[in-house]
Amino acid sequence: MPCFVALLAILSPRLALFAIWLFSNLLDRAFDGFLVPLLGFFLLPWTTLAYVAMWDNGPSGVNGIEWAFVILGFLLDLGAYSGGSRSRRRREPVYEN
């Protein structure tokens, strides 16, 4: 199962989160409610996926160097948002007078 989720994560972190939610209870163990994972699914999927993966890695949640992976996921999310806006600006037509 972990290899399958890793392959899904390469394609789409949202697809991997959906598979984790559907086939395991990792999201339930990492989060207390449903609102934070739902917001993470739509707004910060890489961060949510990294947090869930690192939560399952240790016995007591996310500790130490595992936070570096969560921060890396957050940076991937920020890069996806900034890359999309940069690409959108590049495609906008320039009107000259």
Image (cartoon, rainbow, N blue to C red):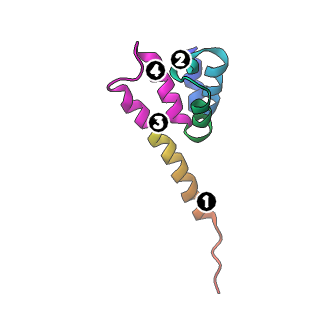
Mark 2 residue element: helix
Residue 50 within the segment the image draws in magenta: yes
User: Which corner quadrant of the image does residue 95 belong to?
Assistant: bottom right
Rounded to the nearest whole Å, what is the CA distance between mark 4 and mark 2?
8 Å
Residue marked by disc 4: 55
Q: Residue furthest bottom?
A: 97
Residue 93 in picture, x, y percent from top left: 65, 71
Return the disc, 4 or 2, that comes first in the chain's sequence. Answer: 2
Query: Considering only order in the chain, which callout, 4 or 3, is on the residue closer to the N terminus?
Result: 4
At label 2, counting other C-alpha atoms closer than 10 Å, the crowd grade (few under 14, some 14-19, many 20 or more) is: few
- Quarter of the picture containing the C terminus is bottom right
- Read off the residue under disc 1: 88
Callout 2 amino acid: Arg
Categorize mark 4 by other alpha carbons within 10 Å: few (<14), some (14-19), many (20+): many
Instruction: Name the amino acid type tagged 3.
Output: Gly
**Disc 1 to disc 3, how far (Cα)?**
23 Å
Q: Nearer the viewer, mark 3 or mark 4?
A: 4
Measure how far apart labels 1 and 4 are at the Cα level. Answer: 35 Å
